[in-house]
Structures are given as C-alpha cells and as structure tokens.
Image (tube, grey):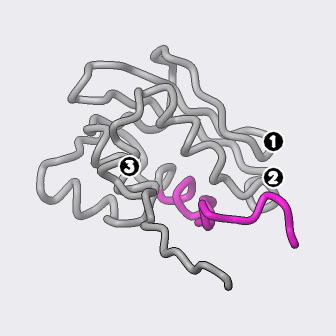
Amino acid sequence: GEINRQVPNLVNASSVSNLGADMLLDFCAIQVNGMKAGDKRICINLTFKDCGEKAMLLLNNGALNHRMVDASALLSLQVTRNDFARLILKEVRPEELIDTGKMKITGDLNELKVLLSLLDSFDPMFNIIEP
C-alpha cells in the first residue's frame, strides 16, 4: 500500500532565523516574484541587532541581491534576524515591530512595504519530479 507521512512545516521564523545573515538574505531573495518586481528599484540598509552584521539589499531588474556592506539607501533598518524572518514570512507587519520597539527605522518605510509585497510564499515540499 501507499504510505502517507505528514511532514512538518520547517519553514518558520524560528528555523529560518538560525541561518547566518548571508543565507537568511538569500532565503529572502528566492522569494521575490521577478515578474512583479521587474521595474522596481529598492535599496535598504539592514543591521542585524543580534549579531551586528550589516547588509545592503538591492532590488533591481526583478532580482534581490545583497552585499555585506553599508551603502546609501532610502531606508535603514535595525532588527534581529528572528524578527526579519518573521517579516519576510509575513508573520508580523513592520508597524507591529516598530510600535513594540523591536525594529528601528530611518527613512521611508514604504521601501520595506513594497519589498514585502513582492515576496511570494511557496511550498517547501514541492515535487522535484512529477509522477
């Protein structure tokens, strides 16, 4: 007979935030819907408060890239990796983190809102080969 095994969803803020900063930003990048992001340009400075790492997120030509440097940007964020993971997984809204003091911003919050609107959710248990 056929065995039906339930696989728990391992894609949550707790597991994702345990990735290093570089891999966490890669995880964010693979969720960008390139078609929706096509003509948008966003630049965000990001400081992870828990590990002190800094990065610059650049959305251009439908792709999100990052560099582990500070650059000139319209928005700067200070947030923990866990809260950033919660943002990109859409478990929390930016305003909630700001209101509770968990995220500090300098600049135009709309830059982050646009970026978050371009992220797709996907099933991590997709079939690699269809039967």
Query: Alpha carbon of mark 1 to alpha carbon of mark 3: how far?
Result: 24 Å
Instruction: State how far apart marks 3 and 2 are (Cα).
Output: 23 Å
Residue tagged by mark 3? 85
Q: Nearer the viewer, residue 110 or 34?
A: 34
Residue drawn 45% across the image and 57% down it: 11
Amino acid of disc 1: Asn
Q: Are marks 3 and 2 in contact (CB under 8 Å)?
A: no
1 is within the stretch colored magenta: no
Residue depicted at x 49% and y 25%: 22
Residue located beneath label 1 in the image: 61
Residue lying furthest top in this view?
69
SS label for mark 3: helix
Dot 2 amino acid type: Gly
Residue name at image x 33 percent, y 59 percent: 94
| Residue range (magenta) | 113-131
The residue that disc 2 covers is 38
